[in-house]
Amino acid sequence: MKTEERIVIEVAAALERETSVNLHRFPLYLGFADGALTIEGEVENIMAKKRALELAAAVPGVAGIIDRIRLVPATQMEDGEIRDHVCTALLAENLLAPCAIWAIVKGKPEVVRETDGAIGSIEVEVTDGAVVLNGAVSSLSAKRLAGVLAWWVPGSRDVVNGLEVSPPEEDNDDEVVDAVRLVLEKDPFVNAAQIRVGCRNFSVNLEGLVKTEAQRQMAEADAWYVFRVDRVVNLLQVEE
C-alpha cells in the first residue's frame, strides 16, 4: 500500500471513530499530495470542524492540512450580506473602536470606518460564505474577539483569522482564558457570571451552572470559536 493511501485510510478511520464528526450525514472528502492532506466538505458545527482537523493532523505523515471544511450555515446568506453583518458587528464593538475597517468588495477595498490616528485596521472579505479577516489589531484579545464576532453571523460558513497583533504579544493559556471570558460576557444568551473558565495547553475547561441545555451548548460553541482553542471540555451543569 502506498504511503498516500495509508494516510488517507488512517485519517478516515480516525474521523469515523470521532462522535462529533458525523460522516454518514456530512461526508468529508480526503486527498493527499506532497505531504499535505486536503479535507473538504460540510460539518454541522465548529466542534466537528476543529476535531476533524486535530485528528487529521495527528496522523503520522501529515505535514500540513489544506482546510476546506465549511459549516452548514444557520441562515442562508449571500456573501455581501454576511460581509455587511460582520462589519456592523465590528463597528459596534468598543474594543475595536480604534481600528479602521475596510470591506473588500470584488477585490477592492471600500471604507467602512476611518479614524484619526487609527490603531490597527481590519479588512473583511467573504467568499462562498467564508469570512477572511486581514490587517492588524493591538491585542490578542481583539484578534480573537473579531474572529468570534465573524463566527456569530448566522450565514458564516468559516472564518479565517489572518489578523496580526502589533506590537506582537506572546500567546499562552492565560490569554485564551481572558478571551473566552470576554466572549462569554459578550454573548447575550449566556450568563458568564455562572461559568468558570480554565485552560491548559490551549484546551479549555468550562465549569459552573447554566439554566438550559441550549445555554450549555452555546457556551461551548463560544469557546470553540476562539482562535487557537484546540479542545473544549464542557463540564457545565444544567440547573434542575
Image (cartoon, grey):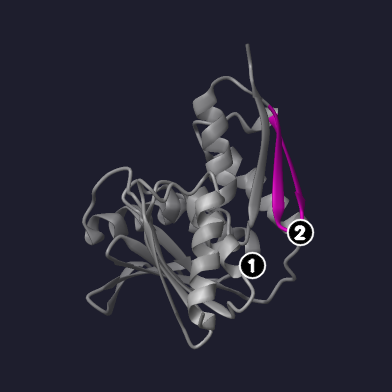
Q: Main secondary structure of the magenta part?
A: strand
Which picture quadrant has residue 164?
Answer: bottom right
User: At 53% from the left edge and 65% from the top edge, which residue is drawn?
Assistant: 11
User: At 59% from the left edge and 61% from the top edge, which residue is drawn?
Assistant: 55
**117, above or below 35, in the image:** above
Which picture quadrant has residue 70?
Answer: bottom left
Is residue 32 one of those drawn in magenta?
no
Mark 2 burial class by Cα count in 10 Å: few <14, some 14-19, many 20+: few
Q: Is residue 146 visible?
A: no
Q: Nearer the viewer, residue 227 or 135?
A: 227
Element type where label 1 sits in the image: loop
User: At 58% from the left edge and 40% from the top edge, which residue is drawn?
Assistant: 220
Is residue 203 one of those drawn in magenta?
yes
Which quadrant would the C terminus be assigned to in this image? top right
What percent of the width, then of the height, locates residue 203? 71, 52
What segment carries the magenta color?
A: 195-208
**168, above or below 75, in the image:** below
Residue carrying label 2: 201
Residue carrying label 1: 58
- Amino acid identity at mark 1: Ala
- Amino acid identity at mark 2: Asn
Mark 1 burial class by Cα count in 10 Å: few <14, some 14-19, many 20+: few
What percent of the width, then of the height, locates residue 190? 55, 31
Residue 97 horizontal side relative to residue 234, left or right: left
Element type where label 2 sits in the image: loop
Task: Identify the residue at the far top of this view.
Answer: 240
Q: Nearer the viewer, mark 2 or mark 1?
A: 1
- Tell me the distance, in whole angstroms, between the alpha carbons under discs 2 and 1: 16 Å
Q: Is residue 112 visible?
A: yes
